[in-house]
Structures are given as C-alpha cells and as structure tokens.
Image (cartoon, rainbow, N blue to C red):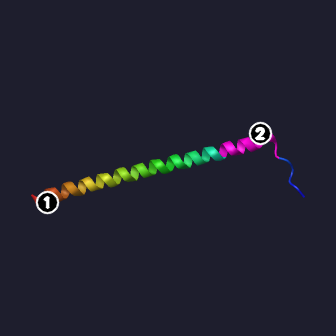
Amino acid sequence: MTPPPVPRGHRAARRAIAAAVYVLAVALTLVLAAALVRAGADMVVRTWEYAAHRAR
C-alpha cells in the first residue's frame, strides 16, 4: 500500500517552512553566541582592570 500522492505545492511549502525554521535557528544561535562572546570579553576586561587597580 502506497500513500496517496502529495499535492505539488504542498511539498514546496513544507520545504520552504523547513528552510525558514533552519535559517531562524541558525540566526538565533549566532545572536546567542555573539552575546556570550561579548559578555565574556567584557568580563575579561573588567577582571584585567580590577587586577591592575589592585596592583597599585
């Protein structure tokens, strides 16, 4: 028993939705990574400045 044929536009719509979800996930991951890198860099700078201040 084979499943009924999928309408022509339906497959394209599912592909488009899958591509949009994938792009959204990648964009969200990049934004989160950028925020974490920025926070990490800020923490390193603060630690460096604190150490320099304590050394005086």
Q: Secondary structure at mark 2?
A: helix
Asked if residue 33 is positioned above or below residue 20 in the image, the reply reads: below
Number of numbered callouts drawn: 2
Q: Residue furthest left?
A: 56
- Name the residue located 59 percent from the left edge and 48 percent from the top edge: 22
Q: Secondary structure at mark 1?
A: helix
- Name the residue located 65 percent from the left edge and 47 percent from the top edge: 18
Which badge, 1 or 2, comes first in the chain's sequence?
A: 2
Q: Residue furthest right?
A: 1
Residue 54 tag number: 1
Specify start and end residues of the magenta stretch as a single range.
6-17
Between disc 1 and disc 2, the foreground one is 2
**Residue 8: image x %, image y %?**
80, 40
- Relative side of 52 to 17, left or right: left
The three-letter amino acid code for the residue at tag 1 is Arg
Residue 32 tag number: none
Distance, label 1 to label 2, CA atoms, is 67 Å
**Residue 33: image x %, image y %?**
43, 52
Q: Are marks 1 and 2 in contact (CB under 8 Å)?
A: no
Q: Residues within 10 Å of mark 2 (few under 14, many from 20)?
A: few
- Relative side of 38 to 6, left or right: left
Find disc 2 in the rendering and name its residue.
Answer: 9
- Name the residue located 39 percent from the left edge and 53 percent from the top edge: 36
The three-letter amino acid code for the residue at tag 2 is Gly
**Residue 23: image x %, image y %?**
57, 45
Main SS class of the magenta portion in the image:
helix
